[in-house]
Amino acid sequence: MDVQTQNVFDNAYYRNLLAQCGLLHSDQVLFNGGSQDALVQQYSSNPALFTADFAAAMIKMGNIKPLTGAAGQIRRSCRAVNSS
């Protein structure tokens, strides 16, 4: 998600956020004086931390068991549970 190293999996995305050059506005809000600033700074300066945390997050997401059939629901609006 960065134009400098678009064919490489690295932490340049976070360095771009620090430089106020996030590709998408929705991404740039990760570094705007809020609660995620410290994490953006850590990932931008520590590629090994980013890689390790990314791998752990992918494993955790891979273990999510989505609800299916009658146990699940496709929402008409992501903000609210469907009403009957």
Image (tube, helix red, strand yellow):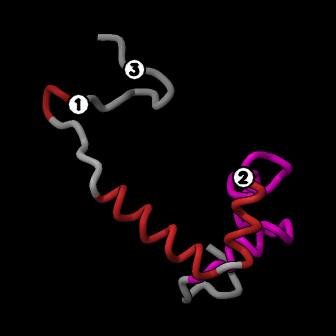
Q: Residue furthest top?
A: 84
Q: Give the residue at x 58% y 73%.
A: 50
Q: Which mark is residue 36?
A: 2
Secondary structure found at label 2: loop
On whether residue 81 falls in the magenta region, the answer is no
Q: CA distance from mark 3 to mark 1?
A: 11 Å
Q: In this view of the protein, which residue sits in the foreground, 41 or 24?
A: 41
Q: Which residues are magenta?
A: 10-36
Q: Residue furthest left?
A: 69
- For the C terminus, give its image quadrant: top left
Q: In this view of the protein, which residue sits in the foreground, 28 or 50?
A: 50
Q: Is residue 17 above or below residue 28?
A: below
Q: Give the residue at x 68% y 73%.
A: 13
Q: How many marks?
A: 3
Q: Which mark is residue 81?
A: 3
What x and y, as percent, mark residue 18?
82, 68
Q: CA distance from mark 2 to mark 3?
A: 28 Å
Q: Amino acid at mark 3?
A: Val
Label 2 neighbour load within 10 Å: few <14, some 14-19, many 20+: few
Q: Which residue is mark 1?
A: 72
What x and y, as percent, mark residue 23?
71, 67
Q: Is residue 46 above or below residue 14?
A: below
Drawn side of residue 59 relative to residue 39, left or right:
left
What x and y, as percent, mark residue 42?
71, 69
